[in-house]
Image (cartoon, rainbow, N blue to C red):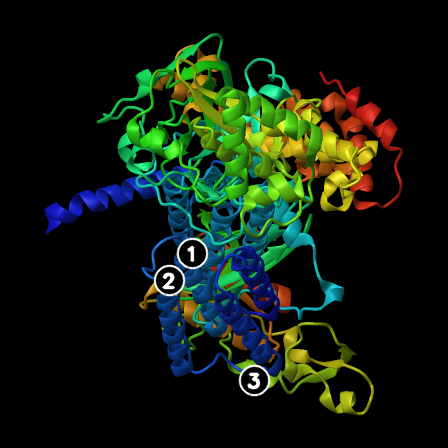
Amino acid sequence: MSSFSEPIVRLKNHVSGWQGKRQPLVEFERFNQRNLYIFPAREGFRFLIIVFLIWMLGTIYENNLVLLLAFFLVAVFVSTIFSTHANLDGLTLRVGDSDPVFSGDQLRVPLLFESKSGRWRRRVFVRYQGQEHVVDIPPSGKATAQLRIDTEQRGWLALGRVRVYTRYPLGVLHAWSWPLLKSKCLVYPKQVPRDTTSSDGTEGHGFAPAGRGMDDFAGLEEWRPGVPAQRIAWKQFSAGRGMLEKTFEAQASNPTWIDWESYKGIPVEDRLSAMCAKAMEMERCGQSYGLRLPGTRLVPSQGERHLRQLLTALAIYPEPPQF
Amino acid sequence: MNELQLSRVQQIWLMSALVISCAPICYFLPFWVAASSLGAIGWRAYLLSRGHAEPNRWVMFLLSVILGLGILAQFSPPVGIEPMSSILTAAAGLKFLEMSRRRESQLLIYLCLFISAIQPIFAQNFGSFLLAVFSIVVVLTAQSMLQRDTDQQFSLFNFSMEPIRQILRLVAVSIPLTLVIFVLAPRLPAFSVIPVQIESATTGVSDFMDPGSISSLSNSSEVAFRVDFEAEVPPARELYWRGLVLDDFDGRAWEPEGRRWIRDNASIIWPNRATSFDWRSETERYGEPHRYTVFLEPTQETWLFALPAAASTKESIGAARNLVLTNRIPISQPTKYDVVSHPQYRHQPNRLDGPQLRDNLDFSEGSNPRTEALIAEWVEQSGSDSVLPNLLSLFNQEFVYTMEPPVYPGNAVDEFIFDGLRGFCEHFASATAAILRMAGIPARVVAGYQGGEIHPTEGYLIVHQYNAHAWVEYWEQGVGWTRVDPTAAVAPDRIEYGFEQYFLNDDVFDPSLFSLDRFRGMALFEWVRLQVDSLNYRWLTLVLGYDTSIQFDLFKRLLGDVTPIRLVLVLVVILAALLAIYLIWNRYNTHRKLSEQQKILRAYLRQLRGLGISIMPAMTLQDILDEAGQKFPNQRANLANLTSQIEQMLYQMRSIDREHLKREIKALKLG
């Protein structure tokens, strides 16, 4: 069994190695002769069979015009090689920005096509893990294919190879490419709330006072985007005073450390998940919180931006984040 | 919308493809085939407009059975081009009626493609070919529409020319390659030659000549054939294009002899084939021959036209004992053949075989008693040798050559000689041959064409149907068969200057009978008519007549010697040239389409690259500035200025003097 499959595996490795050299991981793929492939599609073979029949007919009847038409169709087929190739040639593809999600949620990844030429690029297909999307790219314009990806792992999303192909204009030829694109899509760890495993004091005051902080109402401020819904002053809003944010005393005081060391003894992923859940909770409560990770330290603060930084640090651990 | 379902626009395109590909051949097919296809299309259009789905499967099955039986009943046996086209046309109609998905419609597209390509089997002229190309273009457009997303409702207001333009571009690019393949592709010999029998009336000389049969042709200005002489075209009086020899006379009409010595295949000699009876020694040929190529229009008959004494080396052409050429199968498509004719010859000078002599003396005794009596009188007075000169001078003095002869219903020769005195060439030929036979001189009628029109600029000869003619050959011991044209005696100008010239000065000539020729004398129309003819001639010679021998000659002329290696080399060179043209054109096109702004940006980047700064695709202008600034710190300010100008230009923050910017970029020198 293995003696049979071994050469195939080797061949596969060889091919994927060759493919890897040809189309390495890039932020930005521009399709050209190097990374585009073209081969007759199934319809193309049928087309050629019809042309062959026409040629036979022309030969049997010794009719030069029928032969001429058969040759014309062959020439159209050959020209279609160029026009199908040209439908992708020169296009650029990159992964667009997407909002981070927590692992296990669905990530929407936009693939951005951009054309600089003066003609339409029609019927460009993107196939990725069983999904198929089709875009038409206007002259000197852009188009987006939205991939939906169910995330399983935290960190930068490894998109893997995307198959981009087209059969336009006649459907007789199939031009394709397998770009391997870097994504800027981040997946945060899954949120799994869990108590701290050690109480050696590094956490400081713990988070018992955090609940109290909710009660120390301090006043109202102008609403900013990103404020949790609980902190919006709905009463005032319904009274027609606009969107206001309730601020609390506790936010300024009582900083909490979310500490790597307080989750000793459980696997790394579970630790990160717990820390993630904790951070979300802190933010919800409107408390200020800091992060201690091996190699990374975030001073206590709060707010959307802080939360993002913190979650990013957790997502890409053990890499240190760069802000 | 569902990817698998056809949109309305796609259905309309498919319908157009079907109609345009089938219509030209429906003309040649049984009426009901076209009607059923049209009916299917109409039914579908009705269903479409009502928003119904395709018809019931049982209805479809029933329809297919009915059409199948119809075709079986119409054609027996159902082989050949007509039944095949009928089946394809009917199948395409049915397929259109039932299809609803894209995948199925692909089959219809291929049917239409095939049907379009069949069209030239039925008609080979330039116009029909253009029609075939047009239908292929429509079918390909329909195919490209299937590839598209066509959501929009069809209406004339949002009708887009873009798909058509796209296909036309594709077609235009394909034409050079088509020609290359056409010239270079080897031609296989036909596996089996299937005659194409198309039942459509063709005009031309027939193998049955009774009074009136040739004068009916004189109304037709259709081209019978064209001739390309290697040297000068011989004078008109020598252009007797023999087609058929008519030996059998029943007192009224002439037919080819049905008997063994002339008709039997045994007496026809085919090139490269053994023959049981070689009569070639009966003909002596001498002098300088005429070499020429004939481009014959379809006649649906086997006989060919040539000057005497003709010989051809073409595989499919046989030579009959009475010095006419015959094709193995009926001429159903334009056909080209090379002929070598010796105008000086003696045919059967020494003796005629018993049966042949008997047949060529048979004047169907008793059928024209008054003429028989007159000739007997002539022979008695001055011998049989004087009959012909007497007859010709009689014709010359008392007879009228006319396009509108009276009808001779009974004993045709008697009525013509004694009562009518007016006739067309077949009357004169028929009477002359009969009279010679009455005088004991073996004679026969030859049917064919006489003369022709020389194309003033191209130099080839056009022989029209109105050049159809009949004349006489008589036999003399020691001389063999000699031609005598009684028409020349009554109307010498007809032979000398041609049919048109002769009748143009004649009151009888009705100009409306000639389609384009009615404008003769009007310089512009004359010019147009001749241009159209020379186009057709080129079509015949370059495209229809292109065969293995021309191909071989061409290769020989181009390559010096024809070897496989040289052929492959030529192919490679031509393909490489085509590819190079394509790439250059493509590059030029992309460049042309760049906006002026992008050109400036490109020039800037090119300058920097030339100065050794590596520029990656993902870099912004600022990144590039940083990189360049590090390399050439003293130029940083200048570069920053340029960068900001370019950015302003690209993002149109304010208008920039582009010419100035161009100059600055050009002047950029670092270090």
Circle 3 marks a residue in which chain?
A
Give residue A211's mark. 3
Q: Name the front one of labels 3 and 2.
A: 2
Circle 1 marks a residue in which chain?
B
Q: Quadrant of residue A294?
A: bottom left
Mark 1 closeness class: few <14, some 14–19, many ≥20 residues within 10 Å? many
Q: Which amino acid type is shown beneath numbered disc 2?
A: Phe
Say which residue label 1 marks: B82
Query: Separation of disc 3 and disc 2 at Cα?
Result: 96 Å
Q: Position of residue B327 (x, y in %)?
A: 39, 35
Left or right of residue B425, residue B208 in this image: left
Asked whether the beta carbons under mark 1 and mark 2 sit within 8 Å of each other, the answer is yes
Q: Name the front one of labels 1 and 2.
A: 2
Vertical placement of residue A256 versus B595, above or below: below
Give residue B112's mark. none
Vertical placement of residue A173 versus B58, above or below: above
Say which residue label 2 marks: B75
Query: Separation of disc 1 and disc 2 at Cα?
Result: 8 Å
